[in-house]
Image: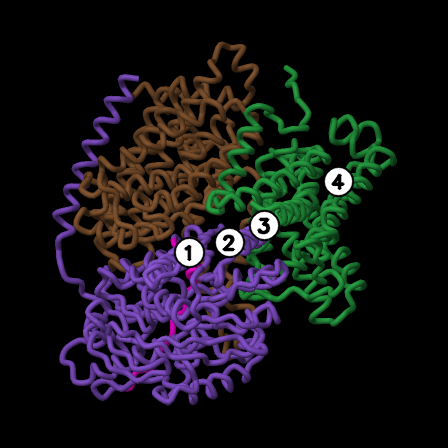
Chain colours: A green, B purple, C brown
């Protein structure tokens, strides 16, 4: 492998890893608070892409307006899903809420097929993001380049929010102990809604960064990235934000280099084996908290 | 635990009895098929309209629906029968396909058209054969669809031919010495055609320098494309679904991939050009028909008629991917329907009850001049087609490149 | 009525019910056309019932949240297919890559192959069970999901070309020898699971589900029982996969993706976690609804010559998902909850009519 090739692979891996990280944070935060694997997250990511098509193609809005609308719509969708499909089940067994998440995922995919047809739709171009830049033999688009940077910025902001604000403190309290924090006067519904707001905001950002260089949207487009991001979250220790970020980058890079080594057929196999091996040595993921069960 | 073992042994014995009892019963040979009754003939449309291949499947359905508006009736033995289409969605999924096929059979169809995507046709083929209902595959190109199944026919060419055509175009016409292949893991269409391309290209003296695969629903191809770029292949052959094509093209451009991109028959679809934009420029693919070919005079009429049909109703345009472009699969759907009708009409003069088995025999002997060329079926049930059309994307339009004749036939 | 008599009556009623169901099946076979949709729905429903029961054994009874069902089904289906495709057809099936030499002439009877399919899955479960079962709830779920995906990808990959035919899949798999075959197999398998659940092992499983620590304190060997539940569940998932292969006649690796596991999980939850009869009932209901009753929704629908705009392709799945959400949201325990179907509703009524002391007649 030449050094330019190596750098090209690195860039590809870090860029896709950044997007995985952004979406994985959504999984990890929801899990941290509700102990729910939000299977619908990948489909929210898909819906965000359709929102963008509506805003920019069907209503011909400029990109900066569209981005705001898309993020708002995605957040709204996420919050509505939480209120309708997850909130009523809060006191029932964890399994039913997870099934509800699978149901939402089904519904979103089927609804998208029904409304927009299964034929792929082109994702609108945001010109300045798509400019090709060439640095010493590596050619790439601006968006590939800024994705990991944006990811780091968002993770930094998010950590500040969680560690240094009141709502952040509430979120930490809720994730430690659901019931006690309720007794302490934390408005639990607000905290949960806020978690979904952040998760969906990041999924919306991830969606823009993901689809700009991969401009094709169809109803099932969210399922595989969703699964990988979920793995990234588990890998890093589900519930931990730095863990999700690390998981995203590790999975992005490892799958890229496995493909580079000529085993494209097995890239997902390696990803899963990596996951299982990590779980065997660190049963709650890399940064996951150890839970001791009380009798 | 002893109890369990005893029980398990007892169960096994009961089971073997059941299995043996069955095998003697299963030897009853010929199938009766479905009889035509009343004044309506039901034709099943077995296509994916949702799922991975939902888009292309829908376009094939549109072709069939249009054909149904052109020829809605058929006269047999002095009775005018209305032809009614019974549509069913096989969801691009093999498990769903078998049940979907079964639901067609139970609704009393005498013939079936479809499906887009070879995998679902292979899965459902046995169901049709068991019921004695003939099926015409419109665009399923995998050899396994018709092989060993007396009731499956098809109107398009096969993957071995298609793979060879693309390989000879790459090696002989363009003089490429090295090629890369990108195909989909677990997909018989994509893998099959890639394997034939590989065989043919290597026979013609070329080398495959990269053979990459991706998973279903994958949407990031950067790593694969970087590998292709590193291999310095002169061309890259990508038989894949429409959805994948629209993803792979822009990524190839962003990666600065210079290899010539070659596609398969699924690529004749304007959605690709619309979604991929200028990244699709220069792509060459093989397809089933060309409206300007003089040996198929019907093609022009079909294209005009079908365009008008699409423009009548905004919903049809939506289903066709937002354009009034004519996809090759629509033409094949049209031809499939017309072949079926021609065979039905040839039943005129048959004595006794008309059944789907009669229809099968009529299909085996059918001769119909269609949009995609003359259709007669070989022993295995494949159309005796010897021509593929190569087209190229130029300025966002499909431009005819050449007609490739199969010399082995 | 004493408990003993109640028990006897229950068994009698169950026996009658089974005979009635069997007669109904015979009736369906005799009096419906071979193409009637009900037959397909019943066959497919019974296969799903077996797989759902096997998943319920793990998820509902032992409290191990596994998402690996599709992987074991794939393993079972492929094992079955490899050993049963008629030897003279193999050249045609492996038309592109050819068949591995050791495989070319092996052909097992259907029943033997079904058992081999189950055993292969059980062995695989034993192998991966040892490390994976140490993981806690959700992590175990993810690990099994990962395992299922690994199986699916490897089965369809090129190094397996000469064994599994890689991406091209296998066809010419023998169909059911007769209409009753799947019902008999499924009934036997479910009966075995039922015996297991009502044995001391079954009570140990339930104890583990309710509280692992308490169960361990009572002297239940956690590791052993979990492993046992996992292996038995995988065995039946494998048999279920093999039946699925027979039903379809042609399989490819993509059939056994995560969606399949989700589908089975939905059936289990709708039926009620921890209820065998619930799983069985819901399998038939879900399959019938999705494949049969709701199919009209995909067709254009006319009332007095006016097309109702909602009815077009894809609508069926939208309605199906909405129904599913309603069930999940408003009928949280599923059809049966953790209860099994029983005859108490009749027995109670008999009790009222015939006040205590009636047993003296016996």
- Dot 2 surroundings within 10 Å: few (below 14), some, or many (20 or more)? some
The residue that label 2 is drawn on is B231
Front disc: 1 or 4 = 1
* Chain under disc 3: A
- Tell me which numbered mark, 3 or 4, is placed earlier along the sequence: 3
What secondary structure is the stretch in magenta mostly built from?
strand
On the same chain, marks 2 and 3? The answer is: no
Provide the residue designation for mark 1: B208
Tag 1: Cα neighbours inside 10 Å, few (<14), some, or many (≥20)? some
Q: Chain of mark 4?
A: A
Q: Which mark is residue A105?
A: 3
Q: Is disc 2 placed on a helix, strand or loop?
A: loop
Viewer-side label of 1, 3: 1
Tell me: B299 left or right of B347: right
**Label 3 and label 4 in one chain:** yes
In space, the residues marked 2 and 4 are separated at their CA atoms by: 50 Å
Camera-side mark, 2 or 4? 2
**Which range of residues does the magenta coloring cover?**
B80-94
Q: Is residue B120 in view? A: no
How far across and down, in percent of the image, does residue B406 sit? 30, 74
Q: Are marks 1 and 4 in contact (CB under 8 Å)?
A: no
One can see residue C260 in this view? yes
Q: Chain of mark 1?
A: B
- Which residue is found at the position 45% from the left and 54% from the top? B209
**Disc 1 on helix, strand or loop?**
strand
Name the quadrant of the C terminus of chain C.
top left
Q: Which quarter of the figure is the N terminus of chain C placed in?
A: top left
């Amino acid at each position: 492998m030449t050094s330019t090739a190596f750098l090209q692979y690195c860039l590809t891996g870090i860029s896709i890893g950044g997007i995985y990280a952004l979406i994985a944070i959504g999984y990890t935060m929801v899990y941290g608070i509700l102990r729910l694997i939000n299977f619908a997250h990948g489909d929210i990511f898909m819906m965000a892409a359709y929102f963008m098509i509506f805003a920019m193609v069907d209503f011909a809005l400029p990109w900066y307006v569209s981005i705001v609308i898309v993020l708002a719509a995605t957040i709204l969708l996420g919050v509505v899903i939480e209120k309708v499909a997850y909130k009523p089940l809060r006191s029932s067994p964890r399994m039913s809420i997870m099934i509800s998440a699978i149901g939402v995922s089904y519904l979103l995919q089927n609804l998208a097929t029904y409304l927009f047809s299964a034929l792929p739709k082109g994702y609108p171009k945001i010109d300045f993001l798509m400019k090709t830049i060439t640095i010493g033999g590596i050619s790439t688009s601006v968006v590939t380049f800024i994705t990991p940077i944006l990811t780091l910025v968002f993770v930094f902001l998010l950590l500040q929010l969680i560690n240094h604000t009141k709502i952040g403190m509430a979120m930490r309290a809720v994730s430690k102990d659901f019931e006690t924090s309720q007794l302490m006067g934390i408005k639990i519904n607000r905290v949960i809604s806020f978690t979904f707001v952040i998760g969906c905001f990041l999924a919306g950002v991830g969606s823009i960064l993901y689809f700009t260089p991969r401009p094709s949207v169809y109803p099932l487009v969210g399922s595989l990235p969703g699964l990988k991001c979920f793995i990234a979250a588990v890998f890093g220790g589900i519930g931990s934000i730095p863990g999700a970020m690390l998981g995203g980058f590790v999975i992005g890079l490892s799958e890229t280099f496995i493909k580079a080594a000529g085993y494209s057929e097995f890239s997902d196999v390696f990803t899963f084996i990596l996951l299982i091996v990590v779980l065997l040595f660190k049963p709650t993921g890399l940064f996951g908290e150890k839970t001791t069960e009380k009798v | 635990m002893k109890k369990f073992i005893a029980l398990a042994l007892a169960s096994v014995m009961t089971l073997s009895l059941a299995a043996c009892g069955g095998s003697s019963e299963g030897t009853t040979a010929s199938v009766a098929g479905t009889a035509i009754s009343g004044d309506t003939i039901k034709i099943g449309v077995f296509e994916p309209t949702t799922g991975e291949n939902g888009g292309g499947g829908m376009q094939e359905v549109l072709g069939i629906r249009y054909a149904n508006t052109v020829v809605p009736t058929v006269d047999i033995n002095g009775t005018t029968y209305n032809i009614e289409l019974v549509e069913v969605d096989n969801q691009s999924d093999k498990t769903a396909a078998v049940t979907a096929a079964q639901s067609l059979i139970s609704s009393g169809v005498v013939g079936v058209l479809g499906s887009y995507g070879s995998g679902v046709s292979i899965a459902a083929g046995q169901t049709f054969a068991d019921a004695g209902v003939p099926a015409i595959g419109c665009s399923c190109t995998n050899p396994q669809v018709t092989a060993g199944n007396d009731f499956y026919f098809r109107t398009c060419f096969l993957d071995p031919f298609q793979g060879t055509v693309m390989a000879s175009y790459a090696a002989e016409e363009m003089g490429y010495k090295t090629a890369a292949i990108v195909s989909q893991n677990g997909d018989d269409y994509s893998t099959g055609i890639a394997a034939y391309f590989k065989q043919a290209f290597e026979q013609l003296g070329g080398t495959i320098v990269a053979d990459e695969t991706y998973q279903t629903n994958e949407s990031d191809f950067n790593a694969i494309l970087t590998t292709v770029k590193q291999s310095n292949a002169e061309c890259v052959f990508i038989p894949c679904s429409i959805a994948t094509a629209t993803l792979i093209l822009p990524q190839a451009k962003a990666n600065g991939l210079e290899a010539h991109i070659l596609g398969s028959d699924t690529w004749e679809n304007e959605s690709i050009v619309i979604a991929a934009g200028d990244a699709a420029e220069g792509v060459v693919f093989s397809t089933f028909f060309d409206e300007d070919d003089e040996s198929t005079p019907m093609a022009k009429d079909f294209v005009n008629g079908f365009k008008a049909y699409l423009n009548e109703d905004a919903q049809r345009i939506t289903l066709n991917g937002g354009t009034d472009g004519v996809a090759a699969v629509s033409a094949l759907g049209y031809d499939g329907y017309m072949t079926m009708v021609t065979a039905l009409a040839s039943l005129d003069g048959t004595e006794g009850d008309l059944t789907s088995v009669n229809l099968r025999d009529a299909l085996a002997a059918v001769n119909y001049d269609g949009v995609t060329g003359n259709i007669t079926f070989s022993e295995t049930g494949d159309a005796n087609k010897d021509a593929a059309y190569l087209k190229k994307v130029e300025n966002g339009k499909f431009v005819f490149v050449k007609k490739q004749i199969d010399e082995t036939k | 009525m004493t408990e003993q008599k109640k028990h006897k009556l229950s068994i009698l009623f169950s026996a009658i019910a089974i005979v009635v169901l069997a007669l109904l099946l015979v009736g369906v076979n005799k009096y419906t056309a071979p193409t009637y949709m009900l037959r397909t729905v019943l066959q497919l429903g019974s296969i799903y019932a077996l797989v759902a029961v096997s998943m319920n054994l793990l998820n509902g009874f032992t409290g191990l949240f596994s998402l690996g069902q599709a992987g074991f089904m794939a393993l079972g289906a492929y094992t079955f297919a490899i050993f049963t495709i008629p030897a003279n057809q193999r050249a045609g099936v492996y038309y592109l890559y050819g068949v591995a030499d050791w495989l070319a002439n092996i052909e097992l009877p259907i029943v033997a192959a079904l058992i081999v399919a189950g055993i292969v899955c059980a062995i695989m479960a034993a192998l991966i069970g040892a490390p994976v079962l140490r993981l806690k709830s959700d992590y175990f779920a993810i690990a099994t999901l990962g395992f299922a995906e690994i199986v699916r990808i490897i089965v369809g990959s090129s190094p397996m070309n000469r064994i599994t035919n890689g991406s091209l899949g296998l066809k010419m798999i023998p169909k059911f020898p007769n209409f009753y075959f799947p019902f008999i197999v499924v009934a036997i398998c479910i009966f075995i699971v039922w015996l297991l659940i009502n044995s001391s092992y079954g009570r140990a499983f339930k104890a583990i589900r309710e509280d692992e620590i308490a169960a361990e304190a009572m002297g239940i060997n956690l590791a052993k029982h979990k492993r046992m539940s996992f292996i038995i569940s995988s065995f039946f998932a494998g048999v279920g996969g093999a039946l699925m292969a027979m039903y379809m006649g042609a399989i490819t690796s993509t059939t056994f993706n995560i969606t399949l596991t989700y589908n089975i999980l939905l059936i289990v939850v709708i039926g009620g976690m921890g209820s065998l009869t619930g799983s069985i009932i819901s399998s038939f209901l879900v399959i019938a609804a999705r494949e049969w009753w709701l199919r009209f929704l995909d067709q254009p629908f006319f009332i007095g010559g006016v097309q109702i705009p909602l009815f077009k392709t894809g609508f069926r799945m939208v309605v199906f998902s909405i129904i599913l959400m309603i069930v999940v949201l408003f009928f949280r325990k599923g059809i049966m909850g953790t209860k099994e179907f029983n005859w108490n509703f009749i027995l109670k009524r008999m009790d009222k009519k015939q006040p205590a002391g009636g047993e003296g007649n016996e």
